[in-house]
Amino acid sequence: MKPFLFSGIQPSGEIHIGNYLGAIRNWVKLLDEYDPLFCIVDYHALTQPYDRDLLAQRTFDAALVNIAAGLDPERCRLFVQSHVPAHTELAWVFNTVTPMGDLSRMTQFKEKSQRAESESYINAGLFTYPVLQASDILLYKAQAVPVGEDQIQHIELTREIARKFNARYGETFPEPKQIVPKEGARILGLDGKAKMSKSLNNYVGLLEDSKSVWKKLGPAVTDPARVKRTDPGTPEICNIYSLHKSFSPPEDQQHVAEGCRTAGIGCVDCKKILHKNMMGVLEPIQEKAAALRAQPERVEEVLDRGARDCADLAERTMEEVRDRIGLRARR
Ligand code: AMP
Ligand code: TRP
């Protein structure tokens, strides 16, 4: 039997190339090495302001886009977090072994609460978000968690929660490792400042068409030293070059790096090459997405099967947990 792999993505907006490069593309590579479980984490999405009327559709779309981007339903299970209630059940138990101090040190919590428009958005769910995440992973005793760089701290805390539980109740959970890609683990937004993110308007969506992508690449920030076409630049500090590293073949990377250093090409030329290569990756995904869109029942079936299988797996762990913590069994 292969060990379980678990990862999740929030249905909090359009899935973008940061998600693809930091997470999804890596998930696809790992499909055969593990027994993979992928989850659309809708309960996590409630921790930030969201549109109630869009949540169900966004959950479906996230599943569809992930399948289109390569999560072959024949080789993995894909499901919706809220369809397996044991996730929140185990999270409650983990709340009781997780130190408040650890949670208050989480960078994502600090950033999101600083960004919040008012105090009332800083809810307890945002604070205990990583506890639910630990429960997602440990419910299946997953050993590998492929994520982007921003999630490393949460996986470290997941290991800490496993240790705390094991120390108190006996060896129950393995300590999972994160798998972070060498290239693309932290994609910057087109503003060149913040991390590319669904909630900041600095992303390229996986389903955006060629024209719309070009409209975004056009004004995207490059090396500020290249004010005029004749000014040479430093590719290593240019965000467009970092995207070349993820989307372009080595020849193109070399060509644009040299052209930049020698001012042999301008930023617009460089962006055109990126645009072509990026669309070469996005277009096949978009075609698959359109085909799935025409057969929504195929996506529904995948989610249905995923939820059924995962609920069974989850229940096995929950029985063990209830016993370990000393709950009275129902007769
Ligand atoms: P989220 O959209 O926050 O649910 O993230 C889903 C996955 O995408 C996680 O594994 C993140 O680490 C990854 N991810 C999100 N934004 C980025 C980014 N800008 N660069 C690389 N990976 C990212
Ligand atoms: N917190 C992750 C993110 O925002 C999403 C997530 C929830 C997750 N549960 C998970 C990722 C379990 C990996 C494993 O990106």
Image (tube, grey):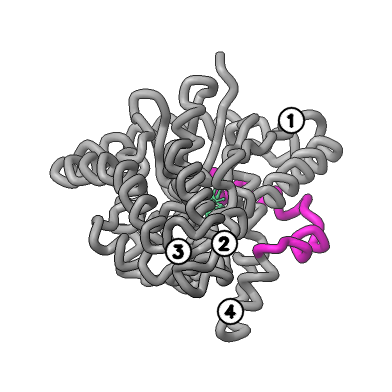
| The quarter of the displayed image where residue 300 is located | top left
Report the residue at 57% width, 42% height from top: 183
Instruction: Tell me whether circle 2 and circle 4 mark residues in contact (CB < 8 Å).
Output: no
Q: Earlier in the sequence, mark 4 or mark 1?
A: 4
Disc marking residue 107: none
- Could you say where residue 307 lies in the image, as x and y percent from the top left? 40, 37
> In this figure, which residue is indicated by the disc labeled 4?
116
Whole-angstrom CA distance, mark 4 to mark 1, is 37 Å
**Three-letter residue code for mark 2:** Gly
Residue 234 left/right relative to 312: right
> In this figure, which residue is indicated by the disc labeled 2?
233
**Mark 1 Cα shell of 10 Å, populated few (<14), some (14-19), many (≥20):** some
Q: Is mark 3 within 8 Å of ligand 1?
A: yes
Give the structural element (helix, strand or loop) at label 2.
loop
Report the residue at 86% width, 37% height from top: 167
Q: Main secondary structure of the magenta part?
A: helix
Q: Is mark 4 within 8 Å of ligand 2?
A: no
Q: Does any portion of residue 39 appear in the rendered image?
A: no
Instruction: Tell me whether circle 1 and circle 2 mark residues in contact (CB < 8 Å).
Output: no
- Could you say where residue 163 lies in the image, as x and y percent from the top left? 81, 39
**Three-letter residue code for mark 3:** Lys
**Three-letter residue code for mark 4:** Ala
Residue 76 left/right relative to 181: left
Give the structural element (helix, strand or loop) at label 1.
loop
**Mark 2 Cα shell of 10 Å, populated few (<14), some (14-19), many (≥20):** many
> In this figure, which residue is indicated by the disc labeled 1?
172
For the magenta stretch, what is the residue range?
86-108
Instruction: Tell me whether circle 2 and circle 3 mark residues in contact (CB < 8 Å).
Output: no
